[in-house]
Image (tube, grey):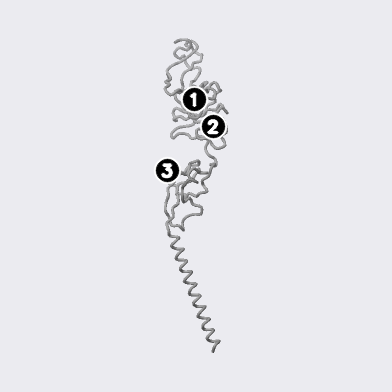
């Protein structure tokens, strides 16, 4: 009789333990479900975030925006906050529109960062100048230059004999965006290279004006002058051997 009572009590105890375990599991599952539905802030790219863009600029320009989603939908490593430790980090590669922004996509050195930044709507053209023809080492990224062209006209120009060279202003105000491998927005490995490291000058021009420069490169000898703020070049002036000393 005693053994039967003990067996019954043991069975009841095991049943109670089982019920308690089920209740605890169910309670935990409910808690996990509620936690999974709790909104959490993540950043999502609205448009392409170019390589080299700082996290702060990307947010300020609306390239990526904070968005609240259910916590269970947040990808591992997602960027959830922007603060002093990561706001100055730059996108290591382009981040496509619609992508969740993962914190590891930002760092200190972009992969394949563009060495120059061409202004919107313009074209970058490189010209080789000798040191004297680019004002020594004083033409630097951000300078504005005048470009002169010395060429042999196909027909007699005003003040020039047939077959002689003439010089005139080809372009009167050109923005320099790079000299050698040093640019307005240099890549990390170009920072240590001096502007005087090469005679290649890269300028930014509207497409139609760029075509003029390309033709000048192919047909004449170009010379650059460093432009002052209020400089006004005479586009109609033609200088030749016969007019060189005319005033």
- The 10 Å Cα crowd at callout 2, few under 14, some 14 to 19, many 20 or more, is many
Spot occupied by residue 119 in the image (x, y as percentages of width and height):
45, 34
Q: Is residue 118 above or below residue 217?
A: below
Which mark is first along the chain, 3 or 1?
3
> At numbered mark 2, what does the secondary structure look like: helix, strand or loop?
strand
Looking at the image, residue 211 lies above or below residue 56: above
Residue 237: x percent and y percent?
44, 16
User: Residue 31's x, y, as percent?
Assistant: 45, 64
Nearer to us of marks 1 and 2 is 2
Q: Residues within 10 Å of mark 3 (few under 14, many from 20)?
A: few
Which residue occupies 49% across, 20% down? 149
Separation of disc 3 and disc 2 at Cα? 28 Å
Residue at x-position 42% and y-position 56%: 39
Residue pointed to by mark 3: 60
In this figure, which residue is indicated by the disc labeled 2? 182
What numbered label is drawn on residue 8? none
> Mark number for residue 215?
1
Q: Nearer the viewer, mark 1 or mark 3?
A: 3
């Amino acid at each position: 009789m005693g053994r039967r009572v003990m067996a019954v009590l043991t069975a009841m105890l095991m049943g109670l333990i089982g019920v308690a375990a089920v209740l605890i599991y169910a309670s935990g599952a409910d808690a996990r479900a509620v936690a999974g539905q709790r909104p959490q802030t993540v950043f999502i790219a609205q448009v392409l975030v170019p390589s080299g863009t700082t996290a702060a600029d990307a947010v300020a320009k609306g390239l990526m925006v904070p968005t609240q989603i259910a916590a269970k939908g947040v990808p591992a490593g997602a960027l959830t906050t922007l603060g002093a430790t990561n706001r100055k980090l730059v996108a290591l590669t382009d981040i496509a529109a619609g992508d969740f922004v993962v914190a590891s996509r930002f760092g200190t050195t972009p992969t394949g960062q563009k060495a120059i930044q061409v202004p919107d709507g313009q074209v970058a053209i490189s010209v080789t100048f000798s040191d004297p023809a680019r004002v020594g080492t004083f033409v630097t990224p951000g300078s504005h230059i005048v470009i002169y062209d010395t060429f042999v006209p196909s027909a007699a120009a005003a003040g020039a004999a047939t077959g002689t060279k003439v010089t005139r202003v080809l372009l009167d105000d050109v923005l320099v965006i790079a000299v050698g491998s040093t640019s307005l927005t240099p890549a990390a490995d170009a920072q240590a290279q001096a502007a005087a490291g090469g005679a290649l000058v890269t300028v930014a021009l509207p497409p139609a004006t760029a075509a003029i420069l390309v033709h000048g490169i192919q047909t004449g000898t170009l010379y650059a002058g460093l432009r002052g703020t209020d400089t006004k070049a005479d586009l109609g002036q033609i200088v030749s051997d016969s007019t060189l000393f005319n005033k």
